[in-house]
């Protein structure tokens, strides 16, 4: 049989070979704490214990077992502890701080000089309510060097981290204050102390053991030593855990997870974004291959593909079984099956045409390309179409709900931050804040 001559292959859009990587490394404690809290408002990001994440929709909530409404302080840490995670490199945290670990261009490193102490670890850069924030709270103090501090990008990174910590502290403080409001003044301090005690209990009983196991630490001493290597301490980790827990809970309680979406909004979105609902033609198929590289010559490869085709066509052997047993091409171990493939995604236009024109469950001709001989069989095929409004409605509603939730969260977070007394070295970064020099005079 006369075969097609173009080479068969897949481009980067083919679903069987797609892959993804995350390469962002923005904080020196990247390997220690990842995903402490995964909520829409405040979370420990995968590579930053202080990373603020306003869009992630994980929900935690409810009162602790046995609680009596809001007469007792709300106990939220336990709901979060099950989702805590940590990533380490080869089981170890980084033992040094470098420009590259902060995402800086090392070619712009400044030489060490005695004048580069403007951001020393003990420098006060903000006060949030009653909580001071030092440079050493944002970067491990024992890892800062004149070269790092003098880097052209250091101040920008410092201000970015500060913005996130200020936001987290603002939300956490408001949460605590709201939970004790309405109580007698003499009882408020005890209520806050109780909440902090309960959160610390969860940290030590659940979160800390989980991190120790992930880091391969067999003792508290070993765990604390690894924290010290990364410039962290147990108290600072517990503080971050508590603040993030309270901050995310405050946003969860204050922002509706089920905003109203009108039918007119759904219809407007559908009409304005019709291209989103176009579905290209696609096909599932399976393939037998005899690659030239696996045989002494083309004649041997041709004999092999003929034999495989005859087993299926005349012998009644299952296509997948023959592929696993004799095929030498891509996906042979999986029965030569290619999952849903959109039209135009194959490099070989003739092969692309064949799988979209050959009858379903009908064997193709033997197709020759630069790599070998192939036989394809179409399993399923869907023609291109555009979803109707009825078909797309659920998807649109989900999209609009998430958009509304995100918007409401950001507006709420902004409101809380603006209503919190904040003094900072860079008041222009945070609307409503004041220059820290006003309280340092």
Image (cartoon, rainbow, N blue to C red):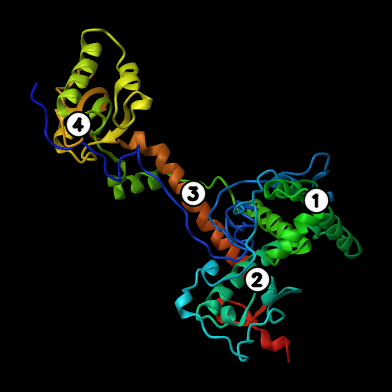
Mark 3 or mark 2, which is nearer the start of the sequence?
2
Q: Seen in the image, is 41 located left or right of residue 328?
A: right
Q: Residues within 10 Å of mark 4 (few under 14, many from 20)?
A: many
Res. 138 mark: 2
Q: Seen in the image, is 56 located left or right of residue 208?
A: left
Residue found at x 67% / y 84% = 436
Cα–Cα span, label 2 and label 4: 58 Å
Mark 2 or mark 1, which is nearer the start of the sequence?
2
Mark 1 or mark 4, which is nearer the start of the sequence?
1
Point out the residue furthest to the front here: 296
Which of label 4 and label 3 is nearer to you?
A: 4
Res. 402 mark: 3
Which of label 4 and label 1 is nearer to you?
A: 4
Residue found at x 69% / y 78% = 121
Is there a contact, CB below 8 Å, between mark 3 and mark 1?
Answer: no
Is there a contact, CB below 8 Å, between mark 1 and mark 2?
Answer: no
Q: Quadrant of residue 63?
A: top right
Cα–Cα span, label 3 and label 1: 43 Å
- Label 3: element kind: helix
- Label 2: element kind: helix
- Label 4: element kind: strand
Cα–Cα span, label 4 and label 1: 58 Å
* Residue 33 drawn at (x, y percent): 64, 56
- Label 1: element kind: loop
Mark 4 or mark 2, which is nearer the start of the sequence?
2
Residue found at x 62% / y 68% = 96
Disc 1: which residue? 219
Which of label 1 and label 2 is nearer to you?
A: 1
Which of label 3 and label 1 is nearer to you?
A: 1
Task: Name the one closer to the observer, 325 or 413.
Answer: 325
Disc 4: which residue? 372
* Residue 30 drawn at (x, y percent): 59, 60
């Amino acid at each position: 049989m006369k075969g097609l001559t173009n080479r068969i292959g897949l481009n980067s859009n083919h679903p069987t070979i797609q892959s993804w990587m995350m390469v962002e490394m923005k904080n020196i404690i990247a390997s220690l704490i990842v995903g402490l809290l995964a909520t829409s408002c405040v979370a420990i990001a995968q590579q930053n214990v202080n990373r603020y994440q306003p869009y992630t929709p994980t929900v935690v909530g409810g009162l602790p077992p046995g609680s009596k409404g809001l007469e007792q302080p709300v106990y939220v840490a336990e709901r979060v502890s099950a989702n805590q995670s940590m990533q380490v490199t080869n089981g170890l945290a980084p033992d040094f701080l470098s420009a590259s670990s902060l995402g800086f261009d090392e070619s712009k490193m400044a030489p060490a000089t005695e004048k580069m102490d403007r951001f020393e670890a003990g420098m006060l850069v903000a006060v949030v309510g009653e909580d001071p924030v030092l440079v050493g709270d944002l970067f491990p103090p024992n890892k800062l060097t004149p070269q790092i501090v003098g880097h052209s990008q250091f101040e920008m990174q410092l201000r970015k981290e500060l913005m996130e910590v200020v936001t987290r502290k603002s939300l956490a403080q408001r949460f605590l204050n709201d939970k004790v409001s309405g109580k007698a003044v003499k009882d408020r301090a005890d209520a806050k102390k109780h909440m902090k005690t309960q959160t610390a209990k969860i940290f030590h009983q659940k979160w800390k053991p989980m991190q120790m196991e992930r880091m391969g630490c067999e003792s508290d001493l070993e765990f604390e030593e690894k924290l010290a290597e990364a410039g962290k301490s147990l108290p600072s980790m517990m503080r971050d855990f508590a603040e993030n827990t309270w901050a995310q809970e405050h946003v969860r309680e204050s922002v509706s997870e089920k905003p109203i979406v009108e039918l007119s909004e759904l219809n407007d979105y559908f009409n304005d974004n019709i291209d989103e609902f176009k579905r290209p033609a696609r096909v599932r198929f399976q393939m037998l291959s005899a690659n030239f590289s696996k045989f002494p010559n083309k004649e041997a490869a041709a004999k092999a593909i003929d034999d495989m085709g005859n087993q299926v066509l005349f012998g009644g052997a299952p296509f997948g079984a023959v592929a696993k047993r004799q095929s030498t091409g891509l996906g042979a171990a999986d029965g030569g099956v290619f999952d849903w493939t959109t039209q135009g995604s194959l490099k070989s236009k003739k092969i692309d045409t064949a799988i979209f024109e050959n009858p379903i469950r009908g064997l193709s001709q033997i197709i020759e390309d630069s790599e070998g001989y192939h036989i394809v069989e179409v399993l399923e095929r869907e023609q291109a179409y555009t979803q109707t409004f009825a078909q797309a409605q659920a998807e649109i509603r989900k999209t609009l709900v998430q958009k509304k939730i995100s918007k409401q969260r950001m507006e709420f977070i902004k409101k809380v931050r603006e209503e919190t007394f904040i003094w900072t070295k860079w008041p222009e970064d945070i609307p409503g804040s004041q220059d820290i020099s006003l309280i340092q005079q």
